[in-house]
Amino acid sequence: MRTQPALSALCRATLAAVLCTTPIVYGSGTSNPVTSNGINGILPTDGLREARNLLMEGYYDRAIEAYLELNRNDAVRFDAALGLVECYLQTGQYDKARNTLDTEAIAGKRSARWHMLLAEVARKTGAYDETIEHARQAVKRDRQLCRARWLLGETLEYVGRREEAIEV
């Protein structure tokens, strides 16, 4: 029967998405969010790890502050902006998330992760065609980006395009 493998494919995709989005905790989580200029021997990349840790532990306000501070440093600006978008998604600030992504697009920076986050914002606001478009772009740029594949499959299934969802 054709339906049995289809269900297991969706289950495998969901499992892969869960495994790919499991938080990786860096450091103790007790240090202060890092400044963007490397003061006190702390590098901006360490700041990204600390900000990510705050995000994954649910300290969204502190993570937003850390990402905003890091966003001032050109060396890590793009990654900080994407982390900031993830914070905004978690706190329901979809307009701020969209504006941050639009700012990075104007700067000419678009990556698989950028497309995936834009697809998530679109999904949260009910723009399913845009969700599909950007999730497809994310998957096209990075086939291993499980979150984008899951988002694409889930959205296709939600809008009634189950056969396409199975192929993701």
Image: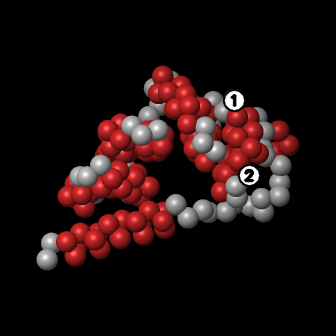
What residue type is disc 2 on? Tyr
- Rounded to the nearest whole Å, what is the CA distance between mark 2 and mark 1? 21 Å
Question: Is residue 78 shown left or right of residue 131?
Answer: right
Quadrant of res 24:
bottom right
Instruction: Provide the secondary structure element on which disc 2 rests.
Output: loop
* Vertical order, 40 against 1 (above or below): above
Depth order, front residue of 68/38: 68
Q: Report the residue at 48% width, 22% height from top.
A: 106
Q: Report the residue at 61% width, 37% height from top.
A: 93
Which quarter of the image is occupied by the C terminus? bottom left
Residue extending farthest top = 106
What residue type is disc 1 on? Arg
* Vertical order, 62 against 36 (above or below): below
Question: Is residue 168 shown left or right of residue 3?
Answer: right
Q: Position of residue 44 (x, y in %)?
A: 70, 42
Q: Mark 2 points at which residue?
A: 59
Label tally: 2
* Vertical order, 108 against 132 (above or below): above
Q: Position of residue 122 (x, y in %)?
A: 43, 39
Whether residue 41 can be seen here:
yes
Q: Name the residue under label 1.
A: 72
The tag earlier along the polypeptide, 2 or 1, is: 2
Question: Is residue 45 shown left or right of residue 31?
Answer: left
Q: Report the residue at 70% width, 58% height from top.
A: 57
Question: Is residue 77 shown left or right of residue 51?
Answer: left
How many other residues sit within 10 Å of disc 2, few (<14), some (14-19) or many (≥20)? Answer: some
